[in-house]
Amino acid sequence: MSSYKPLVLLIGATGQTGSSILKGLLDSGAVRVAALVRPSSISKPSTEVLRTSGVEIRAGDIKDSVDSLKKTLEGVDVLISAVGGPALGDQKDVVLAAEEAGVQRVVPCDFATPGAKGVRGVADIKFGIREYIQSLGVGYTFIDVGWWAQLYLPLPLRSNAPAQVKAGTWLICKDGSANNLVIDKGHIGTFVARIITDPRTLNKAVIAWDDEVTQIAAHEIGERVSGEGEELKKQRIYLKRGDYLASAAAAKDEVAKDPTNVGAYIKVAMSEYGHSLYVLQENTLENAKALGYLDARELYPDIPKFTLEDVAKDFYAEAEPGDIYTAYG
């Protein structure tokens, strides 16, 4: 048996998704790990933490030239991108550099919910990157993970999160019967570490998930586990199916008036995702399989499964559950 451990270069290692992926890679012991770090961040404490964890630091930026990125990617076997939303469209050059550098597998920044083109603007950017990767002929794996379980739960009344953020977590579409795949955000890396070293997943799309729960069940779990019961239940805000697209349209008007309005961009994205999740009901295992995804639960039945209730117990035990929205945004 070969003792060779492939070298994985991770972009966005200190972000919410990236930090989970990093932990999963390191915990697996199956790969060597490098992280792309901007030159301006080389001396930051967060970079030193990476070093002390055994991560090789490679200075660079995805906006560097293809030639520069090609040098940065020398010796890399697998490239994983976990860039933030604003950088999704900037992945093409690093993908091209990866192909020219001989990287064997590219994992672009997906890590969200399955669905069709033309529904969510953010997802369409990701689909464009997928198509570009396939056009180059470089090996790839596309990984989606459902909705973060922590974002599926209603924030408690005690949270100090902004009122509009809290209210956004209290929304329920019609009767709340839409099923959704969810994953503990801290569990993403466990799946990724297995998926990227598995020959069965090369040139495939994979869906990783922990639980599949209706929206109303998520609220019931939150109301019970938070300890706020009936008081939190009173905060429920029921929406009609058409409200998500109406909200997206209104937010797009705000963007047209002020292209610097970041809040409006976020509102567009969240409204379009709401339409996908709760109206079209795209974020289900049945739909993912229909779209051609491999089921990570079938591939790796030994990976522990966390129910939404398991996640809720930890979520509501936090001093400020709303902190996830600050980090997420």
Image: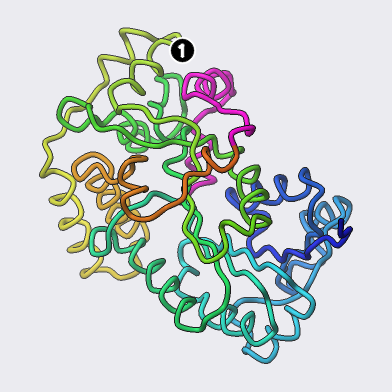
Q: Magenta includes 317?
A: yes
Q: Magenta includes 297?
A: no
Q: Quadrant of the N terminus?
A: bottom right
Dot 1: what SS?
helix
In-front residue for pair 267/162: 267
| Left or right: 300 in relation to 261 | right
Residue found at the far front of this picture? 1
Q: Determine the residue positioned at 68% across, 56% down.
A: 197
| Left or right: 190 in relation to 40 | left
In-front residue for pair 247/79: 79
Question: How many discs mark residues in the rendered view?
Answer: 1
Q: Could you classify mark 1 by the number of other residues whose Cα lies within 10 Å: few (under 14), some (14-19), or many (20 or more)?
A: some
| Left or right: 174 in relation to 206 | left
x, y (%) of residue 162? 40, 36
| Left or right: 314 in relation to 24 | left
Residue on which disc 1 sits: 225
Type of amino acid at the residue the image marks with label 1: Val
Q: Determine the residue positioned at 21% across, 62% down.
A: 252
x, y (%) of residue 177? 22, 27
Which residues, given as a range, are shown in magenta? 301-329
x, y (%) of residue 299? 56, 43
Q: Determine the residue positioned at 31% across, 55% down.
A: 269
x, y (%) of residue 147? 42, 41
24, above or below 156, in the image: below
Residue 306 quadrant: top right
In-front residue for pair 85/253: 85
Residue 303 quadrant: top right
